[in-house]
Amino acid sequence: MQIKTLEDMQTAKKLGLAQLYPDKPKILVGMATCGLAAGAQKVFDLFQRKAQHEHWDGVVEKTGCIGFCYKEPLVDFILPDKPRLTYEQVTPDVAEELWSEISAGKIPEKHFLARLDIDDPILDGGPRKLYKGKLKGFLAKAPRYEDLDFFKLQRHLAMRNCGFVDPDNILHYIARGGYFALYKALTEMAPEEVIEAVTVAGLRGRGGGGFPTGVKWASCRKAQGWPKYVLCNADEGDPGAYMDRSLIEGDPHAILEGMLIGAYAIGSSEGYVYVRAEYPLAVKTLQRSILAAREAGLLGENIFGTGFSFDIKLNLGGGAFVCGESTALMASIEGKPGEPRAKYVHTVDKGLWNRPSNLNNVETWANVPLIIAKGADWYRDIGTEGSKGTKIFSLVGQVKNVGLVEVPMGISIKDMVNLIGGGVPETKEFKAIQIGGPSGGCIPRELWDLPIDFDSLWDAGAIMGSGGMIVMDDSTCMVDVAKFFLDFLIDESCGKCIPCRLGLKRMREILEEFSTGKGTVADLDELQSLAEAVKDGSLCALGGSAPNPVLSTLRYFREEYEAHVLRRKCPAAVCKELITYSINQELCNGCTACVQECPQGAITGEKKKPHQLNAALCIKCGACHEVCKFKAVEVF
């Protein structure tokens, strides 16, 4: 339907609410990339076949990711006058079981994850109780979402619609309050008032350094030149990070609405979303959403009859990490090699095609409609003094609960790892957390009470970045970690400036000398000074932040570096040239598991008698250590 007036918006909202909360049963299957990777497509197809063949009086729909990625595939049952019921790790066989019970009017108990009693769409007038009366039996005792450790400390703002709406259904987004903030901005606020609201709210960029969003918008509005461009950076390239991808796959219209509001404030009529080509589902979702918004009259000419016009084009990324940097991104859109330029001329003055341009990332844009709808003061109440609102993190690594986490700024690292993440696996100890992507820093256990906000992380030698968060336990070698991230950054460097092109390679060479037992104390000093030189002398933010993994590990784990240099030992037993495998004769009971696993035939011995390991044949692959249940294989 075409939407031109407030009455049209109300009609669309009514239609959407009838679909979101139907009088008949509804099945929702999580169909974001994490769900599909776990087999959600087969589950979705099975429910659709069942519903069609058995003439079931209900609907089967897809939705995005709520963040509990390691529990996928997730399936929700929305039944009349019942809580929303979520089931975890639903394979086709499990789906068959669930279907037989649901279609018979029963509530399945197996594979149950949690119930949702109250739906709280932030933009749609407040909480909505999903049932009347009291719950009985299994449901009365079933855990709620807020009872799960993973969700207790979370607050979904940017992710407010993920897992609740069909991302391809614009009516679902409108039903939960979407595009009403755009209407408010266009009909009740001057552009300067929109910028003032974003400024007062304290919104800072969620894609890297945390620059104040309102300040950037104001600078772009004042800049001379036409046309002006509004850009969305969806070129998410950090290892282990997938926040932007999930937002696009789960709630694309929040990003489009944010860009529309920003364009009105800045004075732009044309925008671009620069999205990774390696995100096929996100690309298709954006394409469909842009088309739907255009067909509804929410993109294009004379939006809401106000005279404001704005349209968005999609640009697929060039496959390079450096294209996440603003000037490299703009060069790529122009069809040029994705190389950064010096920043003495700001992109808000001369950016894309040498015109004033405003670039924010996916998560930043998704927050904008909230600020306009709920007010700057409402948003300012969330977070810390210098870091307002929430932040989405991808929590990965050596932690039990892996997934997307959106929390108020200021939560401690300890709470993030132990409460939300469930801690590191048993028998291991938390050692460090790497925050901010490959250019971030490693924060040690002794600082795990540190609040997670822009300024605290910066002072500790890390950055917020886009929100990548990798948990490491005591089996991690910090020299090896620094090597890993330098390898990535060397590959992704455009090579335009000497500090980054040559400095990173020399730093990597020194680290390799440490891990092979050839390093010296002088090398330690050279590594420190070289890292600082690369940080100070590089052309763009990639090179300027690339030494962070080295500098932070030198700062907090220097004794580990010294062990590699002075004692020729790797305390974590990771660096092959510095470790030795042997079999403890007193602990070995001759089970032969190591003999069968060794690819070199380096272990010999009779069954039920202690075995021997030939060090000359051992390639230190660690296979014997992994399969030994009696801890007889020791590493020194």
Image (cartoon, helix red, strand yellow):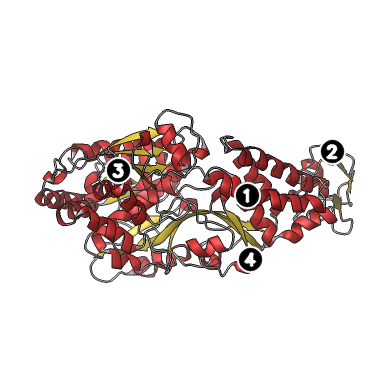
Q: CB of mark 3 within 8 Å of CB of mark 2?
A: no
Position of residue 136 relative to residue 532, above or below, is: below
Q: Is residue 234 left or right of residue 253?
A: right
Q: Is residue 175 left or right of residue 444?
A: left
Picture quadrant where residue 383 is located: bottom left
Q: Residue at x 68, y 62 (%)?
A: 556
Callout in the foreground (4, 2) = 4
The first of marks 4 and 2 along the sequence is 4
Quadrant where the C terminus is found in the figure: bottom right
Circle 2: element type: loop
Callout in the foreground (3, 2) = 3
Kindly identify the amino acid type of the residue bearing the numbered disc 3: Gln
Q: Position of residue 193 (x, y in %)?
A: 23, 58
Residue situated in front as seen by the camera: 468 or 152: 468
Kindly identify the amino acid type of the residue bearing the numbered disc 4: Arg
Callout in the foreground (1, 2) = 1
Callout in the foreground (3, 1) = 3
Query: Mark 1 packing: few (<14 Cα in 10 Å), some, or many (20+)?
Result: many
Callout in the foreground (1, 4) = 1
Q: Which residue is mark 4?
A: 445
Disc 3 versus disc 2: distance between alpha carbons? Answer: 73 Å
Disc 4 versus disc 2: distance between alpha carbons? Answer: 40 Å
Q: Position of residue 626 (x, y in %)?
A: 73, 50
Disc 3 versus disc 1: distance between alpha carbons? Answer: 36 Å
Q: CB of mark 1 within 8 Å of CB of mark 4?
A: no
Q: Which residue is mark 2?
A: 601
Q: Is residue 214 left or right of residue 589?
A: left
Picture quadrant where residue 124 is located: bottom left
Q: Which residue is mark 1?
A: 547
Callout in the foreground (3, 4) = 3
Q: Which residue is mark 3?
A: 224
Kindly identify the amino acid type of the residue bearing the numbered disc 1: Pro
